[in-house]
Image: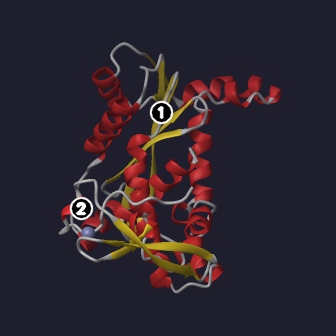
Amino acid sequence: MSFIPRLCPDPNCSYHTIRGGVFHRKGYFKIKRTHQVIRRFQCTHCKKTFSSRTFKSDFKHKKMDLNHTLQKLLIEGNSIRACSRILKMTYKNTYNKFLWLIEQARVQKYNLPLSAQTLYFDEMETIHHTKCKPLSIGLMVNESYQILGVQVSEMPAKGRLAAFSVLKYGPRKDDRESGLNELFQTVKNQLQDTPKEIKSDAKSSYRKFVEKYYPESNYETYNRANKEKHRDRLHEKMQKKKYDPLFALNQRCAKLRCDIRRLTRRSWCTTKKIENLQGHLDLYMVSQFI
Ligand SMILES: [Zn+2]
């Protein structure tokens, strides 16, 4: 479809908001990388020239053809640096494109058509550069293995590293509670229907979230002891879904660790900025629906 200008892109021009402006055709230009020929227009009021590219979200991108490939690579287990080597771009350019991609994803994730009959939720853990600074990722999945929401939050170190972590990095705040609240709220706002069933592991602090956000739904918890009881019998039949009642969730967690390089265990590639981890997860979530 050919582009017909309706408004002037210059915010100081009166035709920026009011329709009815006259725009003259003003030659063409060619995008070198895609060999696309694009018509340029000129506003008769402010004499500024523009084209259909001016209104695109990838306006001023010189390697706009690589945006989609970069997105694919990022959700297939490549680090940003690896992507820059594969695509023959500089690290800085790749990083800037990554920031652009996660910004797009951040906007898109609130408009996704989410639905769930059964809602699974849990938390997984990762690190912020060092094991002394662990992060918690709240995760919600539906029965079709679709990730409905992810929320990253800070948490203090546990176990043997706890004392050392405080000594080296100072006390860390525990945002898991507010993180889960935000996760429940955003998913609830977007879900078309109330889920019939909600399933999670038997962590006692989860119950209050379910009672607050989904009081009518049937809530089931599964602890490890329950799972062990059925292990012998069901394992032989290889019925994964019965063997592990939270399979949809655990499968997604394993997939995330495989597909997002910064979540892999025993790796050099770690998260350096929490907001970028959140963005990367948003990108993964949005990519499921494309
Ligand atoms: Zn104008």
166 or 37: nearer the viewer: 37
Q: Is residue 6 above or below residue 31?
A: above
Label 2 sits on a secondary structure element that is: helix
Q: Which mark is residue 114?
A: 1
Residue depicted at 51% across the width and 65% down the height: 262
52 or 141: nearer the viewer: 52
Q: Which mark is residue 53?
A: none
Find out if the beta carbon at label 1 lies less than 8 Å from the nearest ligand 1 atom: no
Residue depicted at 58% across the width and 69% down the height: 70
77 or 176: nearer the viewer: 77
Task: Please state which amino acid type lies under the numbered disc 1.
Answer: Leu
Q: Which badge, 2 or 1, comes first in the chain's sequence? A: 2
Q: Which mark is residue 15?
A: 2
- Left-right relation of 223 to 273: right
Label 1 sits on a secondary structure element that is: loop
Task: Please state which amino acid type lies under the numbered disc 2.
Answer: Tyr
CA separation, marks 2 and 1? 38 Å
Find out if the beta carbon at label 2 lies less than 8 Å from the nearest ligand 1 atom: yes
Q: Is residue 154 above or below residue 85?
A: above
One can see residue 282 in this view: yes
200 or 284: nearer the viewer: 284
Residue depicted at 56% across the width and 84% down the height: 89
Label 2 crowd (10 A; few <14 / some 14-19 / many >=20): many
- In the current view of this chain or complex, which residue is farthest to the right? 236
Residue depicted at 50% across the width and 84% down the height: 91
